[in-house]
Image: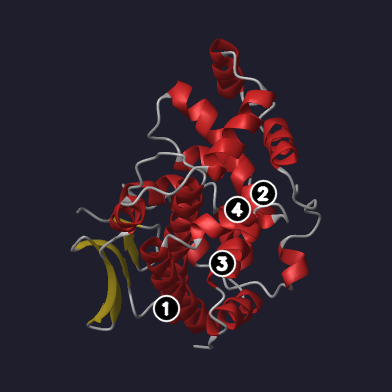
Amino acid sequence: MALTTFHNTGIQYAADFFAEDTIALMLQPPQALTLEEMVMGVAAPPDTPEAAIAAAWAELADDADFQKAVSEKNFTEAQATATLASSIAAPMGATLDAKLADMLKVNYETRVENGNYVYLLDGERILTISGSMDSAPMVAANADAILYGCFLVIDVLGIVAAAASVSVAVQKSKMAKSLQGPLGGFFKKVMNPTAVRELKRLEQLGEKLELIKKVLFWLRGTTNLKTVVGTFLQSLSWIDYAVAIIQLVASVLLLIGTGGATMAAKIMQLGAAIAMFLADLVGFIRALTKQAQPG
């Protein structure tokens, strides 16, 4: 895979995997934020399927493609609420967990070669950071955190989609670049020492569901949720997308509220997929821990 040099730095990257804004973000030191500052001004999440659909519908009010699709499909808020309720109540397919876990696998690795930081995806080099750069260890840790951050978001959205009976093909290696733009605010706020401590705390307590909800809560508080979810669903046809985006946005809102108990129970059946999420979480925490260290 051919690599492009980023301006006058010691960074070379694969342009079909990284956006320039992402490379620029790698050069920035972490912010010092409190948990409250990360999600300041975020409204309380809805606590019923009806309220979740209403909130999601409102978020999509200015989405012309969504409005056109629901109009042509004659799809109403009431129908969306009924679809969400029945989808959450539907039993989990016997093979769904294994299939999802397989889709969430990604062959990503990092190593140091001749003092330089090297990042590989499916055996191909996608990024090299010169060890002679100023703050090279911090930049390298940021790069790792951003990649694992993309993977984490894909994991949690894949898991929630499965619990909400939304069928979507998950391709982490192809989806990661598309999500880098929509996730810019998430990276800027979550890549900080306070987030490291909170994730470590929940991980050490074995709070798998709370970790998933925490990532979703931060996602909602730091991004345009409909854009992130819409990007995640980009493989769907436009008519399927209209139903899926309202269902998935509402499901995220419901899960981080107090009305997502049924969905939470379904999520806990996805043990193999959750294991993939936890593996990416460990990589994310490790990268953020390195990022926070001086040098």
Task: Give the left or right position of residue 93, taking residue 188 as reference.
Answer: left
Task: Find out whether the residues at labels 2 and 4 contact each other: C-beta distance under 8 Å.
Answer: no
Frontmost residue, 161 versus 18: 161
Q: CA distance from mark 2 to mark 4?
A: 10 Å
Q: Is residue 102 above or below residue 276?
A: above
Q: CA distance from mark 2 to mark 3?
A: 14 Å
Frontmost residue, 260 versus 217: 260
Q: Earlier in the sequence, mark 4 or mark 1?
A: 1
Q: Earlier in the sequence, mark 2 or mark 3?
A: 3
The three-letter code of the residue at mark 2 reads Leu
**Can see residue 58?**
yes
Q: CA distance from mark 2 to mark 1?
A: 41 Å
The x, y position of residue 47, in whole percent, is: 75, 49
The x, y position of residue 275, in whole percent, is: 39, 69
- What is the number of the mark on residue 254? 2
The three-letter code of the residue at mark 3 reads Leu
Task: Find out whether the residues at labels 2 and 3 contact each other: C-beta distance under 8 Å.
Answer: no
- What is the number of the mark on residue 162? none
Query: Which residue occupies 51% across, 51% down?
Result: 160
Residue bearing the label numbered 4: 262
The three-letter code of the residue at mark 4 reads Thr
